[in-house]
Each structure stands twice: as structure tokens, then as C-alpha cells.
Amino acid sequence: EDADWEDSEDALANLEHLAKRHPKLKAHLVEPLLTIVIQNRLADADVIELAVITVNNTALKPVVVNLLLQNVLQHPSFYRLCGSDGKPSQKDSTTRLLDALFHLHPTNTCQPSHAEPLLRIYGGTMSASDRRLLSIMRLFEAEKHTSVSAFFARWSPSPDASVTNVLEVVQNFDPIRMLRTCLAFPKWRRFGEDKDATQGPADELMYDPLIVIVLSAQMLVECPPTSALGWVKVFRTNVVSLLIRCLSSKDSNIREAALYQIARYSECIQQSDMQETPKVLYVFRLLKNVMPPPANARDPPRRLPTYASLILLHALRGIFYPSNFIYPRTVRFLLQRPELDVSDVPMLFGMLYSSSDEWKKERGWIVRLLGDGMASAEDWKVLRRRHTWDLVASLFQSSGRDKTLRAGILEMLANLTSNSQACTSLVLKSSLLTWIEMVLGHEAGSDTNHTIAWLRILENIVFLADVSKLERATGGEWCVIICRCLSSLLQTSGDKDTSILNQSALVILRLSLVPGISHHSLGVVAPRRDSRPLSSPPHHAQGLREMPTVSDPLRTWGEIVQGLWRVSMTLEDRTRAWDMLTQRLLIWRNIVRDEKCPIGEWVRRETVRILCSSA
């Protein structure tokens, strides 16, 4: 039975490879395959992937595409597989198939009967599948010149809740998830972007700002609240807080839409009898004072520095959650100033060096704020003005037992090193690498979560720092220090978890591919082979310390052998590690065959050629 399963996997892999190599498959052969796959294997993500490839490489007729779409949408298990009870991989593969079918003949596929069922599986989040579904909705609007607002007026972000209008839709947003969206705002998100944008993380625990903006605008136009309680419910969802955070977006269209809505909210609540109205209007006035109208009425609104938008959204949220410990502190901070200084870090010294009874909570909060606000080069200028990193670095060294604070500082450092300008400046002017080496020297045997965080931060530096500037300033010493840091991490934690070896190998490979540096220093790092490549940098604070799982140990082993063999080829002298890795690479090529390991196939041919020439 196991042998039959392995044969099935091999056959599926061969079919996928064959379909990719033939961009024009015959429709009469593909149609029955797709029909059978949809009817019997919709839950199998690997088989659906084959279906997606064949759909993209076949000229199917519109009537056939419509029939296939109906088979998917009317499948008995469709809502179960794509709902909260299904696996993310199943929803992802199914939406990929739907996306491919919808885009074949949009004029025929974009029908209300096809688009409306998608709302039941749409979650409004930043997951790849939800972004794909939103893309299909936008395709429907573009083809039919009809708004999907009527559909969304009956949609609910909570699958268990039923709604009758768009006001109830907005009031059903989860405030915790909305706050997470504010703090980990996807700065790469754009109005009108392509559906396959992959610059940011796919996070199903975070709302898509675009759908929130659209639904908020629809609510203000169609059915704004008519009572004080209705307005309180809207503000408690943190929707307006997200609109304030959108003013720091890099996309001018998002900023413009958010600013118009904030102005509309301000007008509406002035006519309500909500008890919190004066406090909300005070926050809005502070915001208005730092957002002067552009000289040209056609120009988009200026981008608000992230730290300014964060302090204002925290203040607004505190008005409707007064039990939160930060509420009196943000109110006191804002009331003490006639206007907000957007060029400064708010509440920095008062919270970082607090002497109150809740000093630990305040210190942790300001460190998180510093990390959340580091989203662009402009934000780095605000931080650099107060030498903020130097203050936080000294705090890290003096708080050895406070693991929570240290974790927050590491997340802040991850966001700092995710910006090229900040990363280069920290290495050259704040001796960041020397500081990391010193810290690692005193953290022998640290927990694996901190180890994986350090490795990702080092990868950020290798990936984003300006190598030419580092080379001119240090003469290659920066590379040597990184290698010593890697060696230290491997010696203290390298044998605790495969994921650590995994990330270490990826950093080593990336370092070996940096152009214009000498690779002799890589010899101090002992090559490891038990690992697999992880997500691409930059690594942000979100998920920094999460340990990835290794689902296929054999593939993990093979991919890392291949990566480390590439590293060994960059060394100036032949090493014993190169001999061992070459042997293992040939074994890996024999396991997966040449099409899945082109490097291994090249090594095999070169090895045979050398043996024949030396015979």
C-alpha cells in the first residue's frame, strides 16, 4: 500500500512536470481530467495544483469553463473545505483553481451566480486565499461594470453572525484582529495592485485594509449609525483607528480615502449625542493640525509619520476602552501639548525610564511602539534624531532576566534591519554587529526562540545592508563578525532544533552569494546539512521568534545539502566538507531525479567526466 502511494506521488509529480513543459495541452484530454479531479479530489491540494497547471496551459471553451466553475461551487464539500473547518492548504488550492478558471474567459465567468457564493468563504483577511477572492471580485466589477457592494452588504466577517446591512457588517469586525492590523499594517498594500503581490506576509489573523476602507465608506454613505450606541459600537471595532493608521501608508490612494472618511466621521459624530464625542473630536483636531491641505488641491495628502499615527490611534482606542492602562498616559501626553510634534518619538523618555508602579508594563509598551512604528526611511529619521536604538541597546544589556522585554527589543531590531537605510546606518555608526557579537557571547545556551530571531536578524543585515559601504568602511570585517556570530549560535544551539540548522544554512548561503567580498571567512562556520530553506527576508517583528516546522525531513536534508554545497564551492581552498557534501548531493539527485535537482545532475555529469578523463 505504501509502495502504491509512492507510485501515485511520482506519477502526480511527472504529470505536473509534463504539463508545465507543454504550454498548449489538448482540450479533449484535459476536460475529463479536470472533471474527475473536481468531483473526487477537491480536498487534495497536490492534485488541485495539477488541475491549476492544466487550466493555465489549455485553451478551454467558455461553456466548459462555466461547467467546471459550477462543479466547484456546487461541490458538496466546497464550503466545508474552504471554511473555518477546512485546512488552509485546501482553501488556498481551491481558490487558486477558481482564480485560474475565472480569468480564462472573464466575460462569461463573471456572473452573479458565480461571484455570490465566494462571499461565504471570504474572510476579509490578508491570507493569500482571501486576497485572491477579492481579486476575483474586482475582476467581476471590471467586466460587468457593476459594484459588488450589494453582495458585501450581506457579508459578515464573523461566519456565525447574520447581518442585514453594511452597518452591521462594520460592527461585526473583531476589534482584536483590527488592532493587530493597525500595529502590523501591511505597508506594501496598494489600491489596484496585482493579486499576486507577495512582498508582505500572508496573515489570516489580520484584516485586509482595503476591504475595511471600502466597507467603512459604504457604511457612511448608505446607513451611518443613528444612535449614540451605534457610533460607540463602530468605534469599538477599531475601524476608525485603522483609518488613522492608513494615513501613514505609502499609497496616496489609501491615504486620500482614509482622510476623507475621517473628515466624514468628524462631521457625523458632531450631530450625535455620544458621550465620548468631545474627546474624539479633540483627537481629530490634533490630526487635522498635522495634516495641512496640499498647496495644489489635486495633490494627495502628505504621509503622516508612523509614530504620530500610532499614538493617535492608541489615544482614540483608549477613549472607548478606558480600562486599558495606556489610556490615561496617552491622554495626559496629548493634553500637555498644543499640537503633536510629528518629527519626534512620542512618550519616549517618560515611558522608557518610568518610575511609576507600572514601569515594567510601560517600558514594554514603548518598546513595542518603537518596533511597530519603524516602517520606512522617514520613520528611521525620527528614531535617529533621539538616538533611540542606543538607548534601547543599553536597556537590553541591563535587563538580562526580563525575557519579555528582550523579545520586544529583538522584534524592534528586526524591523530596523528590515529597512536598508536603517540597517546600514546601525552597522556603520552604532557598531551593531559588534554589539550582537558581544551579546551572543553572554547568551550561551539561550532558548531556541531567541536563537532563530538572531539568525533572521543576521540574514536581514546580509540581505539589506549596503555591502559596498560596509566593504569600504570595514574592509570585509563585517563579514568576519557575522561568521563569528553564526559560529557562536551553532555551537550553543545548533543541535537543539532542525529549524535552527535550517535558518543557519540559509544565512550562510546568502552570505556566500554576496558579490564583491572574500569568502575565506566562511571557513570558520561548520557546514550543517539537516535543514531546509525558509521564507525570504526581510524578516519583520511579526513571527520573528516562531519556530517553523519541518514536514518532510528527507526533502529538508536534500535541499540544505544542495545549498551548502553551493557555499562550499565559493571557498578558496578545497575542504573536507566539500567532499562530503558532493557525495550527499549525488545521493539526493538519485532520490529526486534530475528534473528536481538540476545542480545535482550537473555535479553527476562533471564527476563522470572527470573520472573518465583521469582513467
Image (tube, rainbow, N blue to C red):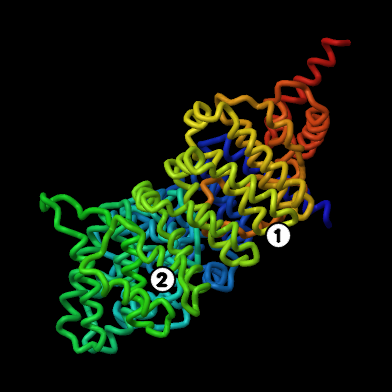
- Please say whether residue 111 is visible from this viewpoint: no
Q: Is residue 505 above or below residue 270?
A: above
Q: Position of residue 5 (x, y in %)?
A: 78, 54
The tally of labels here is 2
Which label is found at residue 447? Answer: 1
Residue 396 quadrant? bottom right
- Please say whether residue 570 is visible from this viewpoint: yes
249 and 472: which is toward the camera:
472
Q: Give the residue at x 21% y 82%.
A: 278
Q: Name the element at disc 1.
A: loop
Q: Give the residue at x 30% y 52%.
A: 251
Q: Residue furthest left?
A: 296
Q: Nearer the viewer, mark 1 or mark 2?
A: 1
335 and 305: which is toward the camera:
335
Residue position marked by numbered label 2 in the rendering = 178
Q: Residue furthest front?
A: 355
Q: In this rendering, would 518 be left or right of 62?
A: right
Q: Give the residue at x 15% y 84%.
A: 271
Quarter of the figure that contains the N terminus:
bottom right
Q: Give the residue at x 54% y 30%.
A: 474
Residue 573 quadrant? top right
Which label is found at residue 498? Answer: none
Q: Position of residue 335 (x, y in %)?
A: 26, 75
Q: Name the element at disc 2.
A: helix
Q: Is residue 40 above or below residue 610?
A: below
The amino acid at mark 2 is: Met
Q: In this rendering, would 442 be left or right of 187?
A: right
Q: Earlier in the sequence, mark 1 or mark 2?
A: 2
**Residues at marks 1 and 2, CA–CA distance in whole angstroms:** 31 Å
Quarter of the figure that contains the C terminus:
top right
